[in-house]
Image (spheres, grey):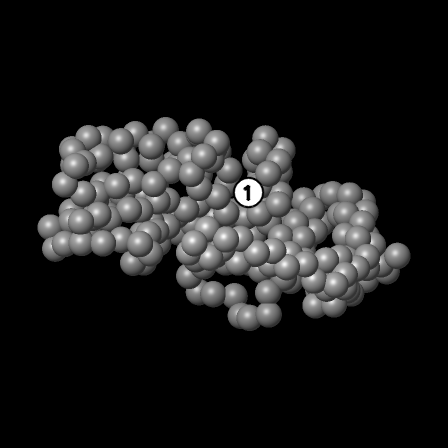
Amino acid sequence: MSNFKVKFDNLIKEIIAPAFKAIGFKKKNNNFYKSTNDLIQIFNVRKSQWNSKEDISFTFNIGFFNPDIFKKTRDRPIPDVPKEYDCFISLRPGFITNNKDKWYELNEKVNYNKLIAEINSDLQNSTISLFNNYQTLNSIKDLVREYPDLQKKMGITARFVFMMKTNSEKEAVNFLNSEYKNALIPKSSVSVINYPDGKRVETQSEPKINQAYIDSLIKISKKYNIELK
């Protein structure tokens, strides 16, 4: 385990950190960040929770942080060093390049030099180029337009504030009202239990409204003096 851990730490120290330092990123643990105009760009190396002595798996996360969006949608102080989970939009580079998640493996079957070459190529050809192309809040509109599924990852209130801040006020108000109307309709939820013997049990709840969600829509509407209908 110690050899794989040393190799993983060396990947951070000798390959990933220099690549981001060269374009102005600062480092804290396995997180890298850089202020660009009205954004803070975030890069994170995340290890799998299922790592073992024989195998270390890890992936990359990208995030874009805007202080005002965070302030209007979160009930806690703005962090000094934002993490990927603080961002109004986050993604994994693999979804941009290959439309699927990508994890790297570090174990006795993996050629370490080939892994280094693969990571170097991925960083330069996808991750770093993505950061170079999207350095303002308005430029994120182009990213979302090209990859519409990213809108779903924003969350409703963050998506609304994002639209308000990028000169899409009418669209934002219509979007918030549509979400509010839909939230007022009682809905059922389904819980699933998978048993070790393969048995699957689904339980459907009685239809009800999500009052906490409705309250969050009302709260954000009041911040912008919008009357929900």
Relative to 169, 1 lies left or right: left
Front residue of this view, candidates 34 and 28: 28
> Residue 113's x, y, as percent?
16, 33
Relative to 198, 17 lies left or right: left
Residue occupying the far bottom of the picture: 76
Residue at the (74%, 67%) spot, across then down: 211
Count up the numbered dots. 1
Relative to 75, 172 lies left or right: right
Q: Which residue is mark 1?
A: 136
Residue occupying the far right of the picture: 229
Front residue of this view, candidates 210 and 78: 210
> Residue 155's x, y, as percent?
62, 52
Q: Is residue 224 visible in the rendered structure shown here?
A: no
> Residue 20's x, y, as percent?
32, 43
Disc 1 marks a residue whose amino acid type is Thr
Tell me where residue 29 sits by quadrant: bottom left
Front residue of this view, candidates 50 and 36: 50
Crowding at dot 1, Cα within 10 Å, few <14 / some 14-19 / many 20+, comes out as some
Tell me where residue 220 sits by quadrant: bottom right
Q: Quadrant of the C terminus?
A: bottom right
Residue at the (11%, 50%) spot, across then down: 3
User: In this picture, is 10 found above or below 111?
Assistant: below
SS label for mark 1: loop
Q: Quadrant of the N terminus?
A: bottom left
Residue at the (72%, 58%) spot, across then down: 188
Residue at the (60%, 56%) spot, across then down: 202
